Amino acid sequence: MKTKRQLWLCLILCCFALPAQADLRFLLPPVSSPAVMYAAFTPLANYLSHAINQKITLSFSANLQSFYNQADQNTPQMVLFCPIAYIRSAHQQAYYPLAGVIPTPGGNHSVIVVRRNSPIHNVLQLRNRSFVMGDPACAASSLVPLSMFRELGMTPKSFSVFRQSGSDQSALMDVAARFYDATAVAKNVAAPYIHSGTLRAIADAEVGPGDLLAASAGVPANVRTKLTAALLTAKMQDPVSIQALGGLAAGFKAINDGDYNALRALYQEIHGVNLLPKVPQEAMTLGIPPTFTPIAAYQIFAPLQKALNEATGLPVQLVIPHNEQSFVADGRAGKFDFALLTPRMVAMEKTQMLPIAQSVPRHDLHGLAIIRRDMSTPGTGPSTGPLRIAFASPYCSARSLAKAKLLRLAGNRPVIWVPEGSEHAVFTALAENRATLGIVRTATVMALEKELPGIWSIVQSAGRAPVWTLVGKRQLPLGIHSAVKQQVAKMPLNVLDTAGFMRFSILPDA
């Protein structure tokens, strides 16, 4: 039998024999060679290792499929995700966002590029041409250009050749070498080709939420908190670690999973797959009518989203149903904590929502515009026969407000009204030649014209657009309604000018 002294000795030896805390894997995507990625991220890994008192080991993938396989493993790890890779992996495994990547200039824009001397000058002219996709995991190279094509009624079948190259650099070189007519990549990636005069951009769209760092469920919550704090202060605490990243990142910012709902909405529209995250979202919701594209709405209404975040003390996520009927149905079902409603929607949802504030129009943008395909665009509709007029239906007042002007434009031509499920679907109807004219808000056409220039032209203005009303769910505590009014009242003048608003006018309590 062991003596008491021997038992104590065994216990001490066992304690010293316990394995050291395992390294935390930092998985990096195959966006460059392992040597380049190792040099770029080693200083950051060392900084984070010190912050959490645990060694962080870099891990590389040979290709995108290998990256997905490793990201899907149920193991404690931190991962650098492109947006599409994130929403796909977060659908397979529980991932918690740590911090968003602040891109270098141009990194949050997607550009469609052609050769400098190409006869192609707008995206519609890409029909029956060849197109090569870049990195399929990055929104700028895949989802956003597919969304721009969708606005014009174009699919991969609209091209003579449509293929995936696997990397942005390969796609750019293929276009420069005349193997394909066009590609789409992040603006900062295309910059050397554009600045040298080899390629030029024919479309330029904001991407929305970008790359991020996320931790798997196996990483303890207290470690995730430390990692987030270290990332958000890295530029100040360890500037060398940020400088080493070069063009891959300019720093890190706060972010939450709900910021990626705009991309999820686009992904579902284009691919028919709803990539719901494994980790339930703890956030309130702001419903936006399907007037703008999901990515444009994410950018345009960010100031209102921020005001609601501050008023409620909770993340507020944008929700943009794919058509107006779905929007009203979701509102009636109580799926929105807050929403922006057209006058007809306010009447439809008055049992669920209380008015909070009303938009004050910016006079140059808050009107209605009668638009058509640009006359210089091949395939523009005929000038004889019935006049087909597209309008958002059934909860937008644009048709009734502009009807007199539209009938005067028609003259003796018979009129066929073409109802669409959303305002941005009116643009698709024109692009597909299903309509000759469309009636939309001026702010909408100006926002889309920035992304896709040379497609539409404004025939004439058609009077004032109906205002939008910010509403909140009736069941919310009165204190939240009051706090929202205070924060909305403090929003800077013209902060929502791209939506056509100067400001919000606070409404009296009902």
Image: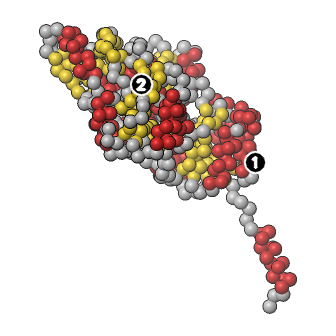
Q: Looking at the picture, how far across and down is residue 294, in whole percent?
A: 42, 32
Label 1 sits on a secondary structure element that is helix
Q: Which amino acid is tagged 2?
A: Ser
Q: Looking at the picture, how far across and down is residue 63, in whole percent?
A: 54, 43
Residue where numbered disc 1 is placed = 50
Q: Which of 410 and 205 is in front in this view?
A: 410
> How many labels sit on residues?
2
Q: Looking at the picture, how far across and down is residue 384, in whole percent?
A: 17, 10
Label 2 sits on a secondary structure element that is strand
In front of the other: label 1 or label 2?
Answer: 2
Q: Nearer the viewer, residue 331 or 91?
A: 331
The residue most toward the bottom is 1
* Mark identifier at residue 236: none
Other residues around mark 1 within 10 Å, as few (<14) / some (14–19) / many (≥20):
few
Position above or below: 488 against 390:
below
Residue where numbered disc 2 is placed = 359
* Position of residue 89 in the picture relative to residue 25 (left or right): left
* Rendered-image quadrant of the C terminus: top left
The residue at 69%/55% (across/down) is 23
Q: Looking at the picture, how far across and down is residue 415, in whole percent?
A: 16, 17
What colouring method underlies this structural image?
secondary structure
Dividing the picture into quadrants, the one containing residue 469 is: top left
* Position of residue 219 in the picture relative to residue 284 (left or right): right
The residue at 46%/45% (across/down) is 477
* Rendered-image quadrant of the N terminus: bottom right
The residue at 53%/43% (across/down) is 314
In the rendered structure, which disc, 1 or 2, sits on the residue that comes first in sequence?
1
